[in-house]
Image (cartoon, rainbow, N blue to C red):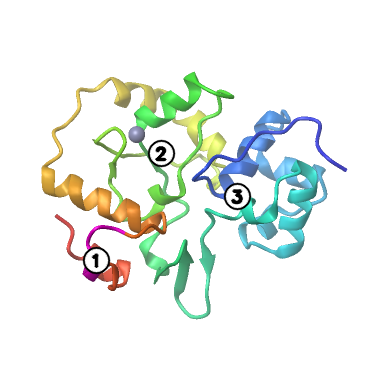
């Protein structure tokens, strides 16, 4: 079975964000309702359970590797991995959403009109959008904690905050802070940088060199 109403997964989007948008496309108010309707459990998707990912691949006709390309993975102990980087689990918080308001508004004005949360924004040391050279803003939590990772809903809930933040005049970002943000962005995307000696260090250690 495939879904009649689909959305494309974005280049740097996690599977959680993708399924949340897919639920909206299929006119479900909450992602839990959507996953239940299609025979999957939201918590299994949150936990990257292979059977749930396979089902989503069949429903959307998107390769499983593409669905999970920007998804973090919990390892044994207290570690998480993301695109070749290994770091402490406390380095990111999936319940605390930060966004670049300008990226969100650009999403809404282009393509399929759906805004999405970039995975790298969840890392606590990512505070600047390297595309717009502006600070990320922290969004308010939705009233029910069980919807905290229903990111499409979190964006809708914060619509006014995002719009007003996008209209504020840009705070000047220092050159060292921007260089640091660009370096961290490249590392989180799994790219090599022009500072190979620094690439040898774990990203958690590099994050302590924050400007
Ligand atoms: Zn941006």
Sequence-earlier tag: 2 or 3: 3
Q: x, y (%) of residue 126?
A: 31, 51
The quadrant in which the C terminus is found is bottom left
In magenta segment, residue 172 = no
Identified at 35% across, 28% down, the residue is: 102
The crowd level at tag 3 (other Cα within 10 Å; few <14, some 14-19, many 20+) is many
The crowd level at tag 1 (other Cα within 10 Å; few <14, some 14-19, many 20+) is some
Identify the secondary structure beneath mark 2. loop
Could you tell me if residue 195 is visible in this image?
Answer: yes
**As drawn, is 110 to the left or to the right of 43?**
left
Q: Are marks 3 and 1 in contact (CB under 8 Å)?
A: no
The quadrant in which the N terminus is found is top right
In magenta segment, residue 194 = yes
Q: x, y (%) of residue 130?
A: 29, 40
Identify the secondary structure beneath mark 3. helix
Magenta residue span: 193-198
Identified at 24% across, 58% down, the residue is: 194
Mark 2, mark 3: which one is toward the viewer?
3
Sequence-earlier tag: 1 or 2: 2
User: Hey, which residue is sitting farthest right in the picture?
Assistant: 1
According to the picture, the residue beneath numbered tag 1 turns out to be 206
**As drawn, is 49 to the left or to the right of 92?**
right
Circle on res. 190: none
User: Hey, which residue is sitting farthest bottom in the picture?
Assistant: 77
Circle on res. 140: 2
Identify the secondary structure beneath mark 1. helix
According to the picture, the residue beneath numbered tag 3 turns out to be 15
């Amino acid at each position: 079975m495939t879904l009649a109403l689909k959305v494309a997964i974005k280049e740097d989007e996690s599977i959680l964000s993708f399924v949340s948008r897919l639920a909206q496309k299929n006119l479900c108010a909450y992602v839990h309702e959507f996953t239940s309707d299609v025979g999957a459990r939201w918590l299994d998707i949150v936990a990257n359970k292979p059977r749930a990912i396979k089902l989503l691949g069949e429903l959307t006709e998107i390769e499983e590797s593409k669905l999970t390309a920007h998804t973090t993975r919990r390892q044994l102990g207290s570690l998480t991995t993301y695109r070749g980087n290994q770091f402490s689990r406390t380095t990111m918080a999936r319940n605390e959403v930060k966004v670049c308001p300008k990226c969100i508004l650009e999403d809404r004005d282009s393509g399929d009109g759906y805004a999405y949360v970039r995975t790298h924004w969840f890392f606590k040391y990512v505070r600047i959008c390297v595309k717009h050279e502006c600070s990320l803003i922290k969004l308010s939590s939705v009233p029910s904690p069980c919807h905290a990772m229903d990111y499409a809903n979190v964006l809708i809930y914060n619509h006014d905050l995002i719009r007003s933040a996008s209209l504020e005049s840009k705070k000047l970002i220092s050159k060292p802070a921007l260089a640091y943000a660009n370096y961290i962005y490249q590392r989180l995307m799994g790219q090599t940088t022009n500072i190979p000696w620094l690439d040898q260090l774990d990203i958690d250690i590099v994050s302590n060199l924050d400007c």
